[in-house]
Amino acid sequence: MKLSKLHFPASRSIGLACLAAAALLAAGGAQAQAQAKPNDTPFYGEIGYTALTYEEMGAKLRPKAVRLLGGYELNPNLAVEAHLLLGAKEGSTTFLGDNYKVKVDNIWGVFLKPKVAVMPDLELFARVGFARTSITASGPGFSDKQSDNSVAYGFGAAYAINDKVTVSLDYMSYYDRKDTRIKGPTLGLGIKF
């Protein structure tokens, strides 16, 4: 087994995914404006721990990352976000007695985030956007840095502890092409500025 290069061809599906997200938002836009509190700030941030799974050619490696996120609420049902994931721990596996490793150097991306409040303190959300992934893969006799772009998407829930602090759990797919996938859950702590 040799970890091959990531396959990141351009995708036409990002436009369709963005249109689908916009259609979801159109349904609740007017009602959402009425729910907004007048002194809410539109800016927020989050720090989280991400347990990624890197899958390629049947192998699964589990690198870990810290995710920093900044967002701006356009209205109560739509936000835009920027994500930065920084590798915290490499993932490794053994195949036929040889050790293979993958480390996420970084993943950054921009996302549309449609969301809906299902209870006063609980919201469900989706994300769709673009991510650039950089990893380092190594094994017997090789070490290779790889970077490229991909459509990224996910879903999750956020619970407001109070007016300023939230706890969230989400699942994101940062890369999914041919035989390679990078995805995983994040547990985050957020704050409104």
Image (tube, rainbow, N blue to C red):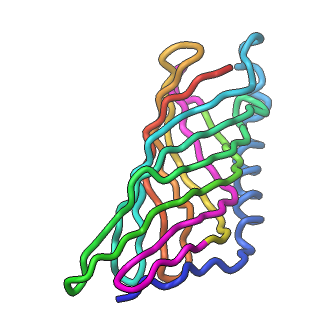
The stretch drawn in magenta includes residue 177 = no
At 59% from the left edge and 16% from the top edge, which residue is drawn? Answer: 164
Number of numbered discs visible in the structure rendering: 0
Q: In which quarter of the image is the N terminus?
A: bottom left
Measured as percent of width and height from the top left, residue 42 is found at 75, 25
What range is drawn magenta here? 117-146
User: To which quarter of the image does residue 114 belong?
Assistant: top right
At 49% from the left edge and 29% from the top edge, which residue is drawn? Answer: 189
Q: Which of 39 and 143 is in front in this view?
A: 143
At 58% from the left edge and 40% from the top edge, which residue is drawn? Answer: 68
The stretch drawn in magenta includes residue 140 = yes
Measured as percent of width and height from the top left, residue 156 is found at 50, 43
Q: Nearer the viewer, residue 182 or 117?
A: 182
Furthest residue toward front:
141
Measured as percent of width and height from the top left, residue 173 is found at 52, 60
Q: Is residue 147 above or below residue 118?
A: below
Relative side of 125 to 138, left or right: right
Measured as percent of width and height from the top left, residue 142 is found at 44, 83
Q: Magenta region, mostly helix, strand or loop? A: strand
